[in-house]
Amino acid sequence: MTIEIRPIEPAEAHAYLKVLPYVNGLPHWEPAPAAWHGGPEAWPPPNAPASAAQLDAWAERVLGEGFHPQAAFVDGRLVGGSAMLAMDVTVPGPRPVALGGVTATAVSATHRRRGLLRGLMQAMFDEARARGEALAGLSASEGGIYGLYGFAPATRRTRWELDRAEAAFADAEPPAGELELADAATARSVWPAVHARVRRERVGELSPQPRRWDGLNDEPAGTFGPMRYLVHRDGSGTADGIAQYRLPYATRIEDTGTLVVEALEAATPDAYRALWALLTDFDLTRRIVAPARPADEPLRWMLRNPRAMRVTRQSDSLWLRILDLPRAVQARAYEAAATLVVEVEADPMAPSNAGTWRLELSPDGASCTRTTAAPDLTLPIQSLGALYLGGMSAALLAAAGRVREHRAGAVAALGRALRTDPEPFNAFAF
């Protein structure tokens, strides 16, 4: 058996796509209730297999700028593939940092457990470091796979529900600005500008891929009615918030009257408050469901009864992997000053990360240099990935055995330096 891992040629784009589950109409998410799905079912049904026209359109994207595919060949046959997207993620500072976003990943069921996925990941990691990307990230379809390659959950998302009868705001003072019920054409023009403002300030937020919002439309989909759009504009008429929502068809009486908020972004507190005030009080509705929302949603604290907003599902969202430790450490700012000697355990897929490092962290900058001093802490690269954006607790990881403390107070110092508020969040997966 001859195995080859390499980038694809243009003529191989269709073969690459055909190994991916979603292209074949197969499930591409674990069979468990998904926090990103707002419908009454656990997750939506798979789409039909891709048509020839869809394959041609997707092939153009696969071969386009910013998409870096790798494929696994066994005896000349393409049996696996993955790719990295050129993206930015907002890190504490806040500031954008280049990230290789792992996507479109699969190995044919006939060729699993032969090391092909590891080979694909290694090839992508090597390419990403050559491009100067200190971080890799992904949205994990299964929770038990990607820790093997150095990734760990770094952000969270929740799905919550709120009965309209319990959605009264504690403070009735109306926010500034105006709301507009918009069509898809307006939404397509507004989303990029609002998201650009939001991601400049929100740690964990991602740059969008080209044409991300091009598919928004006003047409019904099957038994579902059309998507609806709500825009908030400030006093000057500039859009500073947008939401999209739908009223799905329901076969059960208990699911009728449900308004699903598929996405909402607001660049100002006034826009955020105004959007939610209307979305939680539409006529002829009785329940609001919002999937893929931040774990620290401010809306809860605006309600007269904070307990009324019930989290029904929660999961990880962005998984992070550090590819170049010194560059990653120096790329972000820190909440508190700390000097720590950290031992990083063996990292076979990025060997230069392993060893003992002196971290000088402060709000003004940071350095990461090798040292022979005794370590204050020992941890695997996965733990550093989980902690990097500031949303996970160093003390919690230490209690789980994922960080080992050798000097009293070192875990607390690391936690204080790394944490960020509000919690990091990314509005979409990839």
Image: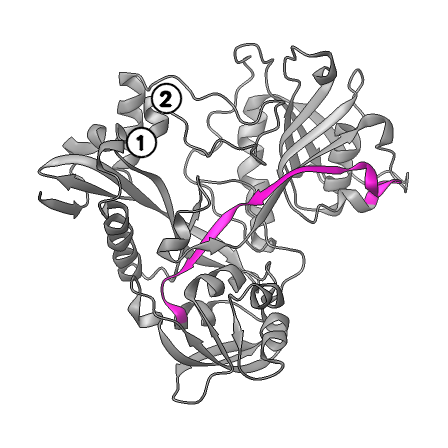
Q: Is mark 1 on a helix, strand or loop?
A: loop
Residue 102 rendering spot, x and y as whole percentages: 37, 46
What residue is shown with label 2? 25
Residue 415 rendering spot, x and y as whole percentages: 61, 70
Q: Residue at x 74, y 30 (%)?
A: 179
Q: Which of 291 and 382 is in front in this view?
A: 382
136 above or below 42?
below
Quadrant in which the C terminus is drawn: top left
- Does 315 sit left or right of 137 as displayed? right
Q: Distance between the residues labelled 2 and 1?
A: 9 Å
Question: Tag 1: Cα neighbours inside 10 Å, few (<14), some, or many (≥20)?
Answer: many
Q: Give the range drawn in magenta.
A: 302-325
Q: Which residue is drawn at 61% across and 83% down?
A: 408
**Label 1 amino acid?**
Leu
User: In the picture, residue 368 is in which quadrant?
Assistant: bottom left
- Does 259 sit left or right of 183 as displayed? right
35 above or below 337?
above
What residue is shown with label 1? 20
Q: Nearer the viewer, residue 275 or 14?
A: 14
Q: What element carries label 2?
A: loop
Question: Tag 2: Cα neighbours inside 10 Å, few (<14), some, or many (≥20)?
Answer: some
287 above or below 420?
above
Residue 343 rendering spot, x and y as whole percentages: 43, 77
